[in-house]
Amino acid sequence: MSTAPTHDVDGGLFAAVDIGASSGRVILGRISAGTRSAGANAADGGPARAMLDVVHRFPNAVVQSDGGLRWDFDALFAEVLTGLAAAGKAAAERGEAVTSIGIDTWAVDYGLVTKAGELTAQPYSYRDERSRAAVARVHGKLDPARLYATTGLQFLQFNTLYQLATEPDLDGLQALLIPDLIAFLLTGQRRTEATNASTTGLFGAVAGEWASELFGPLDLPRDLFPPLIQPGETVGTLLPGIAERTGLPGATKVVAVGSHDTASAVAAVPAEQESFAYISSGTWSLVGLELQHPVLTEASRAANFTNERGVDGTTRYLRNVGGLWLLSECQRTWAEDGYRPEIGELLDAAAALPPGGPRINPDDPAFIAPDNMPDRIRAAVRNTGTVLPDHPAAIVRCILDSLAAGYARTIGDAERLAGVAADVVHIVGGGSQNALLCQLTAQATGKRVIAGPVEATALGNVLVQARAAGVATGGLADLRRIVGAGTSLRRYEPLTSSVPAT
């Protein structure tokens, strides 16, 4: 995948607002000229390729405010506007204009907005503990088995419906999920994008609509969420004040994409076959299969698998597994103590350690909130009757061994529950750059691992916009061929020998 600006291409420029739990970017993307269908050949410029150019990066983090962990949404939105202004400037320097804007972020969190369009408070973060006490209240009103049979959503204490149960008064308010809130402030239009709606616990997995029968028992207003919109549909055009602040034309469209970042990431998995497993590896790891229909069995509920909506009405059948949050939090703690090794140095030292070391459960809720992660990991190991050396390399190896084991277990469970055998495992996102993690995953699963692209979420965002504009054509398989043509992929085979240094 090229990340350099290019001038020998056509077909429009697409701005992807891509925000994760620790950072955000605004990226300009496009599809190469003369290759609007994935089957194009070298005679007309070669296979289609997506090209990305990051024009703005910014940090994102939870803050302690008003008695809880919240997102500084005002600062976040200001960064989005700065990024869109940078995108407009970069486009103008090429003698072009931004065709459309797509937004993806993490799931489940929301802001409450008045009828007048005012945000009542900075949105809570899913890492806040407030929803834990609401779980029993919700399950007292709706049996968990009924919830799963309707929504297909895995149980996580921070799912939107548990967060909403803590709200004292929702009358006259609407809940806008974070990407929908950004889109509303850009366009004035209130919509809920379907892939993210499917993470709320209030969305019908089969019907693909709001599960209105759940709102009454939970005492939720029927109009709490705006109407649904599908990836590829237009939310609206920029408000005059937004156009003035960003320098973008007022006619610039905001197009719904897979606004749950995992939905965009899975859309950009460069799979060449129908049967594949994926790991979207970042702060969290989302591990599973792409299916055409949800799996709503009691066995699936007992295994805590989720059925979330994907682009083109697919089902993302997956579980959340702990992610690289464990490693980044360790690095943060070590930095506070004055120890700041390069990540490559840590991984080399971890790879040199023998296999068979201690493991933790990376999904343990004890690891959700920010705190001293090395101490919590050592405590978790002690609880298993083992001692983890107080050395960063040992802690890193423990994290990666535990994640790889969790990936293998989850993929195996998904295959069994869905009755599908995956031929290969695709790792996309930041974790695809971690050679040790990829190799450990190949060994743990016994399957070939294909790593890349790193920027899967942004690619999925851009490709859905490009298809909406008529620049890219076809279904997911066609979009994925565009990703594969422009991405340098690494392959890892299961080994019988010890893991080599990275």
Image (cartoon, grey):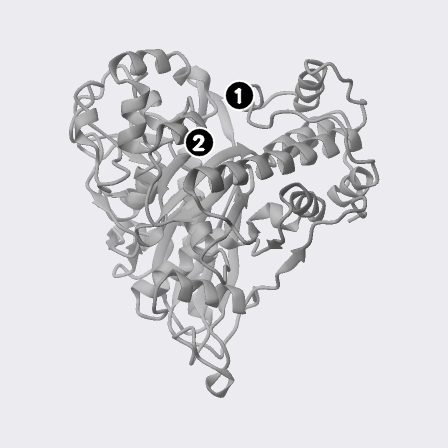
In this rendering, the label closer to the viewer, 2 or 1: 1
Left or right of residue 92, residue 441 in this image: right
Name the spot of residue 329 as percent of width and height, x first: 64, 29
Q: For residue 398, what is the image quadrant?
A: top right
Task: Return the residue nearer the eye: 259 or 271.
Answer: 271
Task: Return the residue nearer the eye: 193 or 213.
Answer: 213
Question: In the picture shown, does residue 169 fall above or below 286?
Answer: above
Name the spot of residue 49 as percent of width and height, x first: 49, 70
Residue beneath label 1, please? 365
Is residue 119 visible to the viewer in this orientation of the structure? no
Is residue 139 visible to the viewer in this orientation of the structure? yes
**Is the residue under label 1 in contact with that under label 2 (CB below 8 Å)?**
no
The 10 Å Cα crowd at callout 1, few under 14, some 14 to 19, many 20 or more, is few
Which structural element holds mark 2?
A: loop
Which structural element holds mark 1?
A: helix
- Disc with the residue nearer the chain's start (2 vs 1): 2
Picture residue at 56% right of the left edge, 22% below the top: 364
- The numbered dot on residue 225 is none
Picture residue at 61% right of the left edge, 64% below the top: 488
The 10 Å Cα crowd at callout 2, few under 14, some 14 to 19, many 20 or more, is some
In the current view of this chain or complex, which residue is farthest to the bottom? Answer: 43
Left or right of residue 175, residue 386 in this image: right
- The numbered dot on residue 72 is 2
Dot 1 amino acid type: Pro
Question: In the picture shown, does residue 238 fall above or below 216?
Answer: below
Name the spot of residue 376 as percent of width and height, x first: 66, 19
Q: For the N terminus, which image quadrant?
A: bottom right
Dot 2 amino acid type: Asp
Name the spot of residue 374 as percent of width and height, x first: 70, 23
Picture residue at 31% right of the left edge, 24% below the top: 161
Label 2 vs label 1: CA separation? Answer: 23 Å
Task: Return the residue nearer the eye: 237 or 280.
Answer: 280
